Amino acid sequence: ENTYYLEDELEDILEAEELDIEKIKSNLHLYNTETICEIIVCNRYLNVYNELTVLCMNELSSRRVNGDNFDFEKHIDNSLNALPKININIPDIGTLFGIKK
């Protein structure tokens, strides 16, 4: 019998390789604007990698100064609003996965 348990999925996630945040930071300038927005959305939604979020926002601001007209604020807000609301009693979901802020 193949029974699927949430615990199995959580264990797989916890055993997965950790993101290489330093690599993301060093390559941030190579990502397209929408990808940077999605990084911000994920980080805000899960309340993780706050330093990376700040770097992403700085990159988007720099791009705007240099002529990028993409409305990143609206894209981020719309993306966050499209996600289901997390309603749990854990103050920081990142702690579940051992993710440092």
Image: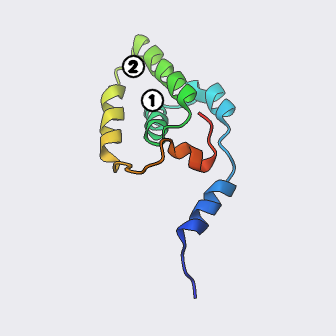
In three-dimensional space, the C-alpha distance between marks 2 and 1, rounded to whole angstroms, equals 9 Å
Q: In the image, what residue occupies the spot 56% across and 28% down?
A: 52
Q: Mark 1 packing: few (<14 Cα in 10 Å), some, or many (20+)?
A: some
Q: Is residue 50 left or right of residue 61?
A: right
Asked whether disc 2 touches disc 1, contact meaning CB atoms under 8 Å apart, the reply is yes
Is the residue 80 above or below the residue 87 in the image?
A: above
Instruction: Classify residue 65 by image quadrant.
Output: top left
For badge 1, the amino acid type reads Thr
Q: Position of residue 56 (x, y in %)?
A: 51, 25
Q: Is residue 32 left or right of residue 30?
A: left
For the residue pair 35 and 43, the one nearer the viewer reads as 43
Q: Quadrant of the C terminus?
A: top right
SS state under label 2 = loop
Q: In the image, what residue occupies the spot 65% across and 42% down?
A: 19
Q: Position of residue 92 (x, y in %)?
A: 50, 42
Q: In the image, what residue occupies the spot 43% across and 33% down?
A: 37
Return the residue at label 1.
33
Return the residue at label 2.
68
Q: Position of residue 24 (x, y in %)?
A: 62, 32
For the residue pair 31 and 98, the one nearer the viewer reads as 98
SS state under label 1 = helix
Residue ranking furthest to the bottom? 1
Is the residue 7 above or below the residue 82 in the image?
A: below
For the residue pair 41 and 61, the one nearer the viewer reads as 41
